[in-house]
Amino acid sequence: MNLTPLLLSLHVLTAVIWVGGMFFAHQCLRPVAASLLEPPLRLAQWVGVFGRFFPWVWVCVIVLPISGYSLLFMLFGSMGHAPLYVHIMNGIGLLMIAIYLFVYFVPYQKLKEAVIIEAWPEGAAQLARIRFLIGVNLSLGLIVVALGSSGRYLV
């Protein structure tokens, strides 16, 4: 049984969910929320949004490496035989996962606590930190999408 189509579909779908979600949140939702909502409501809104988005990202950070390494070994046999663009995607993907883990376990937890105790300046500081890191991850994710879709044609 050839698992390549299934693994490739899972890999692409989870990348679309993660990168697309970051794009929507960073480029569409954030500017509107900042212009319409006062800080207490805006911070509470982001806790709710992240509370719904981050479980999906957890699925992505589990499925992406499993599907990616499975495809790598099925298609190329080993890391040594994989083309350069695959190595770059791998490195960027691991960095993105590390950034997400930091966001989830540090500023997101502090943001939730700040909203609970109504420490609005602290919440705003944590949200700004999250926004910056999501911007970094979004940029990295767009690079990975470009490499994944056209990397084999670059060399």
Image (cartoon, rainbow, N blue to C red):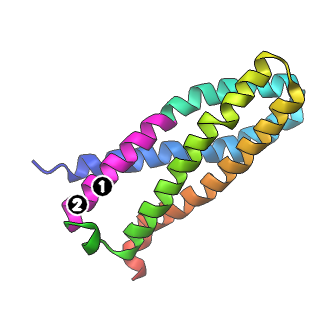
Question: Residue 98 versus residue 40: which sits nearer the camera?
Answer: 98
Residue 155 vs 93, above or below: the answer is below
Q: Residues within 10 Å of mark 1 (few under 14, many from 20)?
A: some
Q: Is residue 139 left or right of residue 117?
A: left
Q: Main secondary structure of the magenta part?
A: helix
The segment highlighted magenta reads 57-76
Return the residue at label 2.
73
Query: Could you tell me the amino acid type at mark 1?
Result: Tyr
Looking at the image, residue 105 lies above or below residue 93:
above
Residue 146, compared with residue 35, is above or below; it is below
Residues at circles 2 and 1 in contact by the CB criterion of under 8 Å: yes
Residue type, numbered disc 2:
Phe
Residue 142 lies, in percent from the top left, at 56, 59
Does residue 123 show up magenta in the picture? no
CA gap, disc 2 and disc 1: 6 Å
Going 73% across and 22% down the picture, which residue do you hit? 113
Horizontally, residue 79 falls left or right of residue 140, namely: left
The quadrant in which residue 101 appears is: top right
Going 84% across and 34% down the picture, which residue do you hit?
124
Q: Position of residue 16 (x, y in %)?
A: 48, 47
Under circle 1, the secondary element is helix
The image shows a total of numbered marks equal to 2
Q: Nearer the viewer, residue 87 or 102?
A: 102
| Label 2 secondary element | helix
Residue 103 in picture, x, y percent from top left: 63, 40
